[in-house]
Image (cartoon, helix red, strand yellow):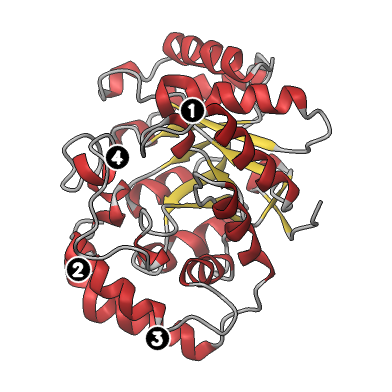
Amino acid sequence: MIRMEQRTLGRTGRDVSVVGQGTWQLGGDWGEVREADAFGVLDAAVASGVTFFDTADVYGDGRSEQLIGRYLKDRPDADVLVATKMGRRVDQLPENYVLDNFRAWNDRSRANLGVDTLDLVQLHCPPTAVYSSDAVYDALDTLVAEQRIAAYGVSVETCAQALTAIARPGVSSVQIILNPFRLKPLDEVLPAAEEAGVGIIARVPLASGLLSGKYTADTVFAPEDHRTYNRHGEAFDQGETFSGIDYATGVAAAAEFAGFTPEGATPAGTALRWIIQQPGVTSVIPGARSVDQARSNAEAAALPPLPQSTLDAVRDLYDRRIRAEVHPRW
């Protein structure tokens, strides 16, 4: 097994790899993934030094959690922190975020993962009012006291939501969209989290694959792939698909970004390396549907830091092509 750089995940006090494994794909929401292939992805990630899996109770209606649970049961030697999410199984109304529902969702996730205590539970991009509710944090503290969960955090869509959560003393981590096409969190969220000792988990790091440089204007995705059915936020927040960027704009920007790739690296690895070296980031969680993708993602942790000239080029690309489209919304 490869030893990867570890960073402390905020107030959990536990160390995790700088590249984690996102498992949305394993639920089937990006197209069908066979069970054997899913186990292969997880095994390749662990062998590459990954010690952090991120999942959610709605990924494949619990399939992602179940696959992780079965994999780790067969791999007791794997030192992996598993973060899951809850809250998207009901209508998105603040009044649904109550202790009784938390316990029910928690029971389901614990059964899926085969554990008594969940390592980290994150509120899954709830309505904005939830982030400032004293009752919600009291309920989460109760779950900790009952030893159902070891720690809790939040997943957010906006910087304002992140800043509200960071101010809460019990919040261990904030998961937020961050990639070379989504720079706004750099301005306030990452500095605030670093000062407060809150971990930052960077999701959608490749802008749903755009930053891999593999796609063109003519690429067609499967009907069951969210990159087909959620381009304009038809099913959930638009930011989760291509980081909220118009697809044609994203393809053109990705082609330019590919030109920043150092010798011996890939565009995807360059994007992940860019995220890893942002001050305040704990772990980045790219997804994978194949063993090769999982290994390639992990290899980004070993790339040398990008020079200032590349960082400046990323900022310039964002300012010219992306800011006017996504900045006002997020």
Mark 3: amino acid: Ala
Q: Is residue 132 visible?
A: no
The local crowd at label 1, few if under 14, some if 14 to 19, many if 20 or more residues have their Cα within 10 Å, is many
Circle number at residue 249: 2
Q: Nearer the viewer, residue 36 or 308?
A: 36
Classify residue 242 as left or right of residue 118. Answer: left
Q: Quadrant of the C terminus?
A: bottom left
- Identify residue for label 3: 313
Single out the mark in the foreground, 2 or 1: 2
Q: How many marks?
A: 4
42 over 249 or under it: above or below:
above
Question: In terms of sequence position, does the residue under pointer 3 or pointer 4 come before the other?
Answer: 4
Q: Residue at x 52, y 88 (%)?
A: 308
In the picture of the structure, the residue carrying the numbered disc 4 is 225
Q: Who comes first in sequence, dot 3 or dot 1?
A: 1
Indicate the position of residue 22 as horizontal and vertical percent values. 52, 43
Could you give the CA–CA distance between mark 2 and mark 4, rounded to whole angstroms? 20 Å
Between the residue at mark 4 and the residue at mark 1, the CA separation in whole angstroms equals 34 Å
Q: Residue at x 50, y 46 (%)?
A: 174
Res. 137 mark: 1
Labels 2 and 1: the sequence-earlier one: 1
